[in-house]
Image (spheres, rainbow, N blue to C red):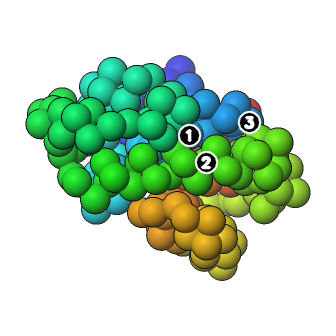
Amino acid sequence: MEKRRCGWCVGDSLYEAYHDEEWGVPVHDDATLFEFLVLETFQAGLSWITILRKRENFRKAFDHFDYRKIAEYPQAKIDSLLQDSGIVRNKLKVNATISNAKAFIQVQKEYGSFSKYIWGFVNGTPIKNAFKDYKDAPAKTALSDSISKDLKKRGFKFVGSTVVYAFMQATGMVNDHEVSCFRYSMV
C-alpha cells in the first residue's frame, strides 16, 4: 500500500524525502533551527524545491550553518559567497544571514537558547491544524506576524510573516500536514 502524502511534495523524490523525514518534525536544536532560518530566508521569493536542491551547497558555503563563524565573516568571505553559483547569490540575503547570526547569538544570551525563545511563542507545544488540502494552509497568521515583528525588533532581517510561517511549518511549531497524510499523526 502506498503512503498518502501532502499534495505539495508528491512526484519529486527529494521533496518526498524532505516531507517524510523533516517537514513538521519539532526541532529544538539551535544549530538546526538556525539552518532552517537561513534556508527560509534564502527561499523568500523562490520555491522551496530550489533551496532544497541547493541545500548541500548552502551547507558547505556557510560552514555547516555555524552561526558563530557566520557572525564573524570578513568581507573576503562575503565576496566569495556572492561568487558561489551553488547558492542563491543575493547580496541582501547573504548580508541578512550574517546579521541574523549575530542576532541569533544575542537571543541565545538572553534566553539561554534560541529554541527556548522561539518555542515560547507556542508555549512549547506545536499548533496542530487540520487541513484537508495543503492549499488551505495560510501563508501567514497573526502569530507569525507577531513573531516576525519581534524578530525584526531584535535585528533579524528577511523575516517577514510569510518566511516566519514557513519556518514554523518546517520546524514543527505548527503541524500543517494534510489530515490524510501519513505524517499528520506522527508529528
Q: Secondary structure at mark 1?
A: helix
For the point 33% across and 37% down, the residue is 74
Q: Which mark is residue 104?
A: 2
Amino acid type shown at disc 1: Phe
> What percent of the width, then of the height, locates residue 38?
44, 44
Location of residue 168 with respect to 27 vertically, above or below: below
> What percent of the width, then of the height, locates residue 177?
60, 48
Q: Secondary structure at mark 3?
A: loop
Q: CA distance from mark 1 to mark 3?
A: 10 Å
Nearer the camera: disc 2 or disc 1: 2
Determine the residue located farthest toward the right in the rendered image: 123
Q: Earlier in the sequence, mark 3 or mark 2?
A: 3
Label 1: few (<14), some or many (≥20) within 10 Å?
many
> What percent of the width, then of the height, locates residue 117?
77, 53
For the point 39% across and 55% down, the residue is 96
Quarter occupied by residue 92: bottom left
Q: CA distance from mark 3 to mark 2?
A: 14 Å
State which quarter of the image contains the C terminus: top right
Q: Are marks 2 and 1 in contact (CB under 8 Å)?
A: yes
Amino acid type shown at disc 2: Phe
Q: Mark 1 highlights which residue?
A: 34
Residue 156 visible, this orientation: yes
Q: Which mark is residue 28?
A: 3
Report whether 154 appears left or right of 10.
right
Q: Secondary structure at mark 2?
A: helix
Label 2: few (<14), some or many (≥20) within 10 Å?
many
Report whether 155 appears left or right of 107.
left
Q: CA distance from mark 2 to mark 1?
A: 8 Å
Q: Are marks 3 and 2 in contact (CB under 8 Å)?
A: no
For the point 48% across and 40% down, the residue is 71
Report whether 57 appears left or right of 10.
left
